[in-house]
Image: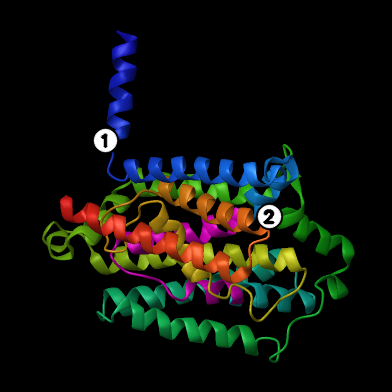
């Protein structure tokens, strides 16, 4: 009886929309990782695995934000610049002597404001998401430039003191918990929260409904504007968190931080089966997609592939993933 129940649960999980694409991405991850490990056994080293998990975490966070937006059939071109703005604002405030927690809260408020603007422009005023978020992308990057007078910041420990700066950097990047870098745990907790939010709440169902058929969603009583704003808020929250990580990693603010990260988020989502056309995909796939992306980048680097070759291989992967998504949607 128990075995029948377990079999039924497994079948139910496998029938979940988007689960097939997620499992395919995980299978691809195993194949890619094993292939690179055969070419260079150092890929299998414990230190490389830890570094891979830490680096993957930034792509996972960006991927979560971008996936939420893509499931509604939209896109967020501003998320990478929001990450850069977050890094620069946080670092600038800290170099002025502001407590790290207060600096992050102020920065988060500004990032979320960008999310509200994106959501209102796309949801209420019906601006094409490409145009709306292209505009806020330039605005956020502009803020990143001017917030410290068009220059990168000094080291955050200069004014705060080494102890305070070290605590901030260790929390977000260099510290470990249970032998794994804190960066991964932060990303994993955020992933778990937003996975539950998307798959188990009414708002999550509304997000899928808007992406599947916005007119039908309206007739069903879904507040499309509010739902759209929520997805962009989540996107910019994730961008802000990546900014904190980038700031902690460098120990300073870099005006170019987060550059093209919006494309990394798209890649993580579509490789994991999130449809750029909207209405389908799960965050488990985004997790797998972020891991595939980082494993490709890490593995190609470990075997000495030129940067140009790395970009071509990853670009082909993204196009192939989108093509598979389009073909799958046509069949459905």
Q: Which mark is residue 312?
A: none
Instruction: Answer whether labels 1 and 2 touch (C-beta < 8 Å).
Output: no
The residue located at (86%, 75%) in the rendering is 159
> At 57% across and 64% down in the image, what residue appears?
310
Query: Horizontal and vertical percent for residue 146?
Result: 64, 90
Front position in the image: 240 or 102: 240
Residue labelled with disc 1: 15
In this rendering, the answer to whether 60 lies above or below 143 is above
- Which of the image's four quarters has the N terminus? top left
In space, the residues marked 1 and 2 are separated at their CA atoms by 37 Å
Q: Is residue 181 magenta?
A: no
Task: State the image coordinates of residue 118 (x, y, percent, origin top left).
Answer: 38, 76
Q: Which callout, 1 or 2, points to the residue nearer the camera?
A: 2
Towards the viewer: 39 or 53: 39
In the foreground, 203 or 183 = 183
- The image position of residue 82, as x and y in percent, is 54, 74
Q: Is residue 80 magenta?
A: yes
Is disc 2 placed on a helix, strand or loop? helix
Q: Nearer the viewer, residue 108 or 25?
A: 25
Q: Residue at x 45, y 40 (%)?
A: 27
Q: What secondary structure is the magenta-colored segment mainly? A: helix
Q: Residue at x 29, y 56 (%)?
A: 325
Residue 234 in sight: no
- Is residue 299 left or right of 253 when viewed as pictured? left
Q: Residues within 10 Å of mark 2 (few under 14, many from 20)?
A: some
Q: Which residue is mark 2?
A: 302
Q: Secondary structure at mark 1?
A: loop
Farthest front residue in view: 39
Q: Which residues are magenta?
A: 56-84
Label located before the other in sequence (1 or 2)? 1
| Left or right side of 183 for 322 | left
Q: Where 148 sits versus 88, above or below?
A: below
């Amino acid at each position: 009886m128990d075995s029948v129940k377990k079999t039924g649960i497994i079948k139910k999980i496998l029938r979940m929309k988007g689960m097939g694409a997620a499992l395919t991405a995980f299978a691809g991850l195993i194949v890619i990782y094993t292939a690179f490990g055969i070419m260079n056994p150092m890929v299998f080293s414990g230190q490389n695995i830890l570094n891979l998990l830490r680096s993957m975490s930034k792509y996972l966070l960006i991927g979560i934000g971008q996936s939420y937006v893509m499931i509604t059939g939209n896109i967020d071109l501003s998320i990478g610049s929001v990450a850069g703005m977050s890094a620069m604002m946080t670092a600038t405030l800290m170099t002025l002597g502001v407590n790290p927690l207060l600096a992050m809260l102020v920065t988060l408020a500004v990032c979320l404001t960008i999310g509200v603007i994106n959501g209102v422009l796309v949801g209420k005023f019906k601006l094409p998401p490409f145009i709306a978020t292209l505009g806020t992308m330039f605005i956020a990057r502009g803020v990143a430039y001017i917030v410290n007078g068009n220059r990168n910041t000094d080291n955050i420990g200069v004014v705060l003191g080494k102890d305070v700066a070290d605590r901030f950097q260790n929390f977000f990047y260099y510290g470990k918990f249970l032998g794994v870098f804190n960066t991964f745990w932060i990303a994993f907790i955020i992933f778990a929260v937003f996975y539950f939010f998307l798959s188990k709440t009414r708002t999550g169902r509304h997000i899928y409904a808007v992406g599947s058929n916005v007119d039908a969603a309206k007739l069903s009583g879904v507040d499309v504007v509010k739902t759209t704003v929520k997805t962009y808020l989540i996107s910019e929250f994730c961008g802000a968190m990546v900014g904190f990580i980038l700031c902690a990693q460098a120990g300073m603010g870099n005006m170019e931080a987060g550059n093209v990260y919006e494309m990394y988020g798209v890649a993580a989502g579509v490789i994991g089966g999130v449809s750029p056309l909207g209405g389908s995909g799960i965050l488990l796939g985004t997790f797998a997609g972020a891991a595939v992306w980082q494993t490709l980048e890490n593995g190609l680097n470990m075997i000495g592939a030129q940067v140009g070759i790395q970009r071509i291989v990853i670009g082909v992967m993204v196009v192939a993933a989108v093509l598979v998504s389009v073909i799958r949607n046509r069949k459905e």
